């Protein structure tokens, strides 16, 4: 009985106690020996001890310290399978979480404490994080000894939906592992991200439900082991000093991020990550763009999501805590590209930047993104010319250029459409100017049977409907007809005069023939 975190604990389920030595300093031959019964899996923290087997299956742990006063070890061992299970159903944000609490048979207090903690803690975590409870089926929470967890006070296994918490761990440890239900490699793969937010939400939820535990503090000793969080290796890779620093620093960073936004802002970030949304979204779309490269580093994606979903900047925190020397220049390149992106978005106004630009920004392909934004700026400048030209002609600019600009065929297609619309406007303006001039008599003759006004009207309609090519062709056909009207009129007058002279000649010839015929065939009068 008693508190779970006491130094000496001897039960059927778990054995835990410190081991030290005594003797005469500088004398050889001293030894330390511990015998454990069969059936217990053991671990040793502190000074190393050799391991051997007894004939009955028990374990011998031994050491021969050179300095007995410097020797210290802590031994823990547990007997597998000695559990009593308690099943619970907990309402978590509109869903029902099915839990199995597995406590050692001789430690019912742990089971009761853990059941109460999960009943209050899971709903608090879900509300703070803002995502649905993700576990399908049963979540098991089991009491464990150090021999099962090594240097860690708790472990969450997303494959088996199981949490193991050391018997002597505090409430924050249990809540930390419960928070890993959400932050476990599904939202983000980077270790520091998952540990940062599991710890942040565990402590926040614990304060909300009135439980306490150990919290990290970045003191000078921890800072001596400082590394960029992107260099934090996997479980069991780093030294204990680096592990302690990384846990403390990641929690510190999560707190600084949270201080710059609010719960709703973080909700938006986690929602975007959960639904695989691209960081850079079109401003005027009704549905988010879903596009996340499997190879995209999560430290990059999280920074983009934070700065695109909240009204704050976090790049300075990344420079201080996250990136290493090789990655730091990327942040500087990103800052320049993002300023260019914001300027281009402002210039585009009611138009959305195409997915190609947004995706290149999200993949941190900044040189390619800037190159495409240069091309976009040229198209937007052409848009302004089109709007001014259309306004001068009392025309409504078509939507074809916007569709090409926002589409997936690239800025070259949009540039061609803009050039075609400008050419169509030039042709319409020229035709309109020509029709405003009063035609000469010869031009009027040349335009007989032509309806240039109707042709111009058709060209205007084609332009507004988005067929700039047809608009230009129609306007230029009217222009050609008007330009040729003088010559056509002259030809018609000449041809008309010749025809008139020909008719008069034929009439005179016919009259002459008739006279000669009468003369030849005149009949003399009879006597």
Image (spheres, helix red, strand yellow):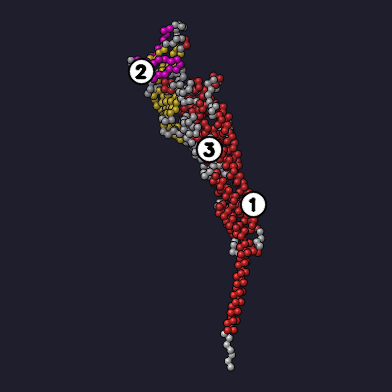
Q: CA distance from mark 1 to mark 2?
A: 96 Å
Mark 2: few, some, or many residues within 10 Å (few <14, many ≥20)?
some
Q: Nearer the viewer, mark 1 or mark 2?
A: 1
Which residue extends farthest left?
A: 55
Q: Earlier in the sequence, mark 1 or mark 2?
A: 2
The answer, for residue 126, to whether it is visible in the render is no
Which residue extends farthest front?
A: 520
Q: CA distance from mark 1 to mark 3?
A: 38 Å
- In the rendered image, the quadrant that contains the C terminus is bottom right
Q: Are marks 2 and 3 in contact (CB under 8 Å)?
A: no
Q: Position of residue 370 (x, y in %)?
A: 57, 38
Q: In terms of secondary structure, where does tag 3 sit?
A: helix
Does the magenta run of residues contain 207?
no
User: Which residue is identified by label 2?
Assistant: 38
Q: For the point 59% across and 84% down, which residue is it?
A: 519
Q: Earlier in the sequence, mark 1 or mark 3?
A: 3
User: Which residue is identified by label 3?
Assistant: 360
Determine whether 119 is above or below 36 in the image.
Answer: below
Q: Nearer the viewer, mark 2 or mark 3?
A: 3
């Amino acid at each position: 009985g008693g508190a779970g975190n006491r130094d000496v604990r001897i039960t059927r389920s778990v054995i835990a106690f410190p081991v030290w030595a005594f003797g005469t300093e500088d004398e050889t031959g001293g030894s330390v020996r511990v015998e454990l019964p069969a059936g217990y899996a053991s671990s040793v923290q502190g000074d190393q001890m050799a391991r051997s087997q007894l004939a009955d299956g028990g374990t011998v742990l031994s050491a021969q310290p050179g300095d007995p006063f410097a020797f210290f070890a802590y031994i823990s061992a547990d007997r597998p399978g000695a559990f009593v299970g308690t099943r619970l159903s907990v309402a978590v944000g509109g869903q029902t979480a099915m839990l199995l609490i597995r406590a050692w048979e001789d430690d019912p207090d742990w089971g009761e404490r853990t059941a109460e903690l999960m009943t209050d803690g899971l709903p608090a975590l879900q509300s703070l994080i803002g995502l649905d409870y993700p576990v399908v089926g049963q979540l098991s929470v089991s009491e464990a000894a150090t021999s099962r967890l090594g240097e860690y006070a708790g472990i969450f296994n997303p494959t088996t939906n199981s949490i193991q918490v050391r018997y002597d761990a505090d409430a924050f440890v249990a809540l930390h592992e419960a928070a890993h239900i959400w932050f476990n490699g599904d939202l983000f793969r980077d270790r520091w991200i998952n540990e940062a937010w599991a710890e942040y939400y565990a402590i926040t939820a614990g304060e909300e439900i009135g439980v306490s535990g150990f919290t990290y503090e970045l003191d000078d000793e921890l800072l001596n082991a400082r590394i960029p969080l992107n260099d934090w290796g996997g479980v069991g890779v780093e030294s204990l000093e680096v592990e302690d620093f990384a846990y403390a620093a990641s929690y510190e960073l999560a707190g600084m991020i949270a201080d710059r936004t609010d719960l709703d802002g973080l909700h938006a970030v986690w929602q975007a990550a959960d639904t695989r949304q691209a960081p850079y979204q079109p401003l005027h779309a009704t549905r988010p763009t879903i596009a996340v490269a499997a190879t995209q580093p999560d430290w990059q994606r999280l920074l983009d999501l934070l700065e695109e979903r909240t009204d704050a900047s976090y790049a300075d925190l990344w420079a201080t805590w996250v990136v290493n020397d090789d990655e730091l220049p990327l942040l500087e390149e990103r800052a320049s590209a993002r300023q260019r992106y914001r300027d281009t978005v402002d210039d585009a106004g009611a138009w959305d930047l195409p997915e190609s630009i947004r995706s290149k920004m999200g993949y941190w392909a900044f040189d390619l993104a800037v190159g495409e934004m240069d091309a976009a700026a040229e198209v937007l400048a052409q848009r302004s010319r089109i709007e001014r030209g259309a306004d001068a002609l009392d025309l409504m600019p078509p939507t074809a250029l916007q569709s090409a600009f926002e589409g997936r065929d690239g800025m070259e297609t949009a540039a061609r459409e803009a050039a075609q619309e400008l050419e169509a406007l030039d042709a319409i303006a020229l035709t309109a100017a020509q029709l405003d001039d009063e035609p000469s008599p010869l031009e009027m003759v040349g335009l007989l049977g032509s309806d240039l006004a109707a042709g111009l009207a058709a060209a205007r309609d084609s332009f507004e409907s988005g067929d700039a090519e047809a608009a230009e062709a129609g306007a230029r056909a009217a222009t050609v007809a008007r330009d040729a009207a003088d010559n056509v009129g002259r030809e018609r007058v000449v041809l008309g005069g010749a025809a008139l002279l020909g008719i008069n000649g034929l009439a005179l010839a016919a009259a002459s023939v008739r006279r000669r015929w009468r003369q030849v065939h005149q009949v003399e009068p009879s006597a």
